[in-house]
Image: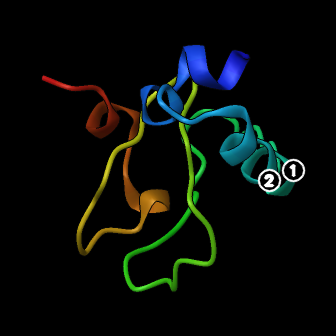
Amino acid sequence: MFLKLRVPFFADFDKKTLRPVMERMLCNFYKKHTTVCKMGDEAEYMMIVIDGELAAYKGVDHEELSNKDLVPS
């Protein structure tokens, strides 16, 4: 199963446990530099990053950041 191979969190789940989890999953794709959520937002679901990376910024709106600020130093 793809999920068990790519996401270590699910590696030890048996089929009986994993199936209901997978049935409730939704797959979303986000473009680079998209704001997915903001500090203080209520968590309505769990997010799993299969490919790519996330960054957290406190007290700054992503839209105010320049590309220079998004590149790790």
Residue 9 horizontal side relative to residue 43, left or right: left
Residue in the picture at 47% in, 30% down: 12
- Quadrant holding the C terminus: top left
Residue 56 position by quadrant: bottom left
Front residue of 3/43: it is 3
| Contact between labelled residues 1 and 2, with CB atoms less than 8 Å apart | yes
Q: Point out residue 52 in the picture as x, y percentages from the top left corner.
A: 51, 24
Residue 6 in the image: above or below residue 12: above
Residue 28 in the image: above or below residue 56: above
Q: Residue furthest left?
A: 73
Q: Point out residue 9 in the picture as x, y percentages from the top left corner.
A: 44, 36
Q: Which mark is residue 23?
A: 1
Front residue of 45/16: it is 16
Front residue of 54/73: it is 54
Residue 46 in the image: above or below residue 33: below
Q: Secondary structure at mark 1?
A: helix
Residue 10 horizontal side relative to residue 29, left or right: left
Q: Residue furthest right?
A: 23
Residue 51 position by quadrant: top right
Q: Which mark is residue 20?
A: 2
Q: Amino acid at mark 2?
A: Pro
Q: Point out residue 24 in the picture as x, y percentages from the top left corner.
A: 82, 57
Residue in the picture at 78% in, 44% down: 22
